[in-house]
Image: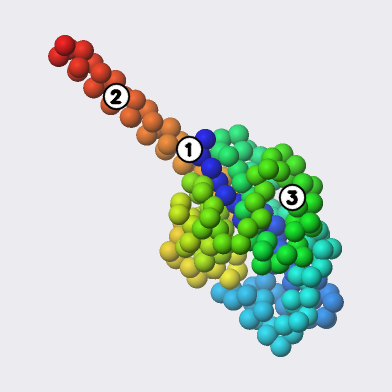
């Protein structure tokens, strides 16, 4: 089975939506996700940096993040054909460790918890594919990178892009089909070679 490494924030966890909702609620702002195209939340509101960053210190924030639409059903299906690993750059926010772990156990209980990888630099990850919204991580990754659309990366053009989990499912199932075809072709080639050797003999 081929191996897929999957990022957490902005890929299976809709961290940004939750962050904007909590920030708007607590600071009476009306920031919209559509205002964040090509930029980060901090870049959109640099004057309230500490307010925005304060959520990273809160376990209840990470524990209550919404699940990205369709990620559960699609990962459940893909896990029948691929080895699935969740790889999150949790070192960026050490306070999030426990909450992220509990969140994964609650929402992705069909995955093996031994496949949860809390790391920093993802160049250390050995997998065939990495699904991530962060171009920096994709650039360092040695396998095939798949860019998962998030507001800040909408202008990136260097990677295979999936806009949501339904598109990701279609892409990985097509890949599976292609791999299968390749294997069949190779087998056919080998059979031909065997026959030729037998005939020669
Ligand atoms: Mg991410």
Q: Is residue 46 positioned above or below 163 on the image?
A: below
Q: Is residue 121 positioned above or below 25 on the image?
A: above
Q: Residue 104 carries which label?
A: 3
List the residue tagged with mark 2.
Answer: 190
The residue drawn where x is 48% and y is 46% is: 128
Q: How many marks?
A: 3
Q: Quadrant of the C terminus?
A: top left
Q: Closer to us: mark 2 or mark 1?
A: 2
Q: Does the residue labelled 2 lie within 8 Å of ligand 1?
A: no
Q: Closer to us: mark 1 or mark 3?
A: 3
The answer to whether residue 104 is left or right of residue 149 is right
Of labels 2 and 1, earlier in sequence is: 1
Instruction: Verify CB contact (< 8 Å) between mark 2 and mark 3.
Output: no
Q: Residue 5 carries which label?
A: none
> How far apart, in angstroms, are the residues tagged by discs 2 and 1?
21 Å
- Of residues 146 and 92, the one drawn nearer to the viewer in this rendering: 92
Q: Is residue 174 positioned above or below 53 on the image?
A: above
List the residue tagged with mark 1.
Answer: 176
The residue drawn where x is 77% and y is 46% is: 105
Q: Is mark 2 on a helix, strand or loop?
A: helix
The residue drawn where x is 47% and y is 63% is: 139
Instruction: Verify CB contact (< 8 Å) between mark 1 and mark 3.
Output: no
Residue that sits furthest to the left in the current view: 200
Q: What element carries label 1?
A: helix
Q: What element carries label 3?
A: helix
Whole-percent x, y for residue 28 in the image: 83, 81
- Label 3 environment density (alpha carbons within 10 Å; few <14, some 14–19, many ≥20): many
Of labels 2 and 3, earlier in sequence is: 3
- Label 1 environment density (alpha carbons within 10 Å; few <14, some 14–19, many ≥20): some
């Amino acid at each position: 089975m081929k191996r897929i490494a999957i990022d957490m924030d902005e890929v299976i966890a809709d961290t940004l939506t939750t962050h904007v909702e909590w920030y708007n609620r607590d600071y009476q702002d009306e920031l919209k996700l559509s205002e964040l195209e090509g930029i980060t939340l901090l870049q959109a509101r640099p004057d309230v940096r500490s307010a925005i960053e304060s959520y990273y210190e809160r376990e209840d924030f990470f524990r209550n993040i919404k699940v990205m639409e369709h990620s559960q059903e699609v990962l459940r299906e893909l896990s029948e054909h691929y080895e699935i690993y969740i790889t999150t750059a949790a070192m960026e926010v050490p306070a999030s460790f426990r909450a992220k772990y509990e969140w994964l156990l609650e929402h992705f209980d069909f995955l093996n918890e031994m496949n949860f990888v809390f790391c920093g630099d993802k160049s250390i990850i050995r997998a065939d594919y990495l699904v991530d919204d962060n171009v920096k991580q994709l650039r360092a990754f040695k396998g095939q990178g798949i860019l998962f659309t998030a507001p800040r990366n909408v202008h990136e053009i260097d990677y295979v892009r999936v806009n949501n989990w339904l598109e990701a499912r279609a892409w990985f199932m097509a890949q599976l089909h292609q791999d299968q075809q390749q294997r069949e072709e190779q087998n056919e080639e080998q059979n031909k070679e065997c026959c030729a050797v037998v005939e020669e003999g």
